[in-house]
Image: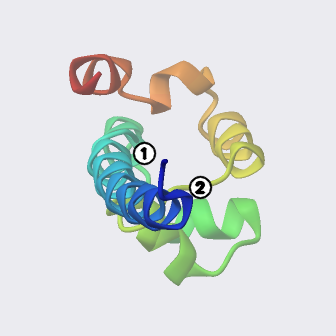
Amino acid sequence: MIDWIRLLKNSASITIIFGNFAVKQLKSIMAKLNRIRVVLAERDMNNKWLSDKLGKDPATVSKWVTNTTQPNLEALIAIANALEVPVQELVRQEECNQEK
């Protein structure tokens, strides 16, 4: 007979291990995704300008620009509007596709 308790315990640990691996992979992908810094430089603009334009804390914008954290979709759309570029220009799709 199957020992369901042992199976569930092992399954949970596999999920945790896989979950941690998936989170690390996702962070690795996300760290390479945004091009905000590049687009700001191309437009000869800086973090301060963007934070003022968006009404966001300069530290938050700095984290987005350095890929420490990623903006949510709403913020990404606002950034694209402020920079007058399509959202797609702010995202490195080729990086995401290579990681799959």
Q: Position of residue 75 (x, y in %)?
A: 71, 51
**Eye-nearest disc, 1 or 2:** 2
* Above or below: residue 8 compared with residue 82: below
Q: Is residue 18 left or right of residue 88?
A: left
Image quadrant assignment for residue 51 = bottom right
Image coordinates for residue 15, horizontal then vertical, percent: 44, 55
Q: Residue 75 or 31: which is nearer the viewer? A: 31
Q: Which residue is mark 1?
A: 36
Of residue 49 and residue 28, the one placed in the foreground of this image is 28
Q: Position of residue 63 (x, y in %)?
A: 43, 71
Distance between mark 1 and mark 2 Cα atoms: 10 Å
Element carrying mark 2: loop
Say above or below: 84 vs 2: above
Q: Residues within 10 Å of mark 1 (few under 14, many from 20)?
A: many
- The residue lying at 34 percent from left, 26 percent from top is 96
SS type, badge 1: helix
Which of the two residues, 25 or 55, is positioned nearer the viewer here?
A: 25
- Report which residue position mark 2 lands on: 71
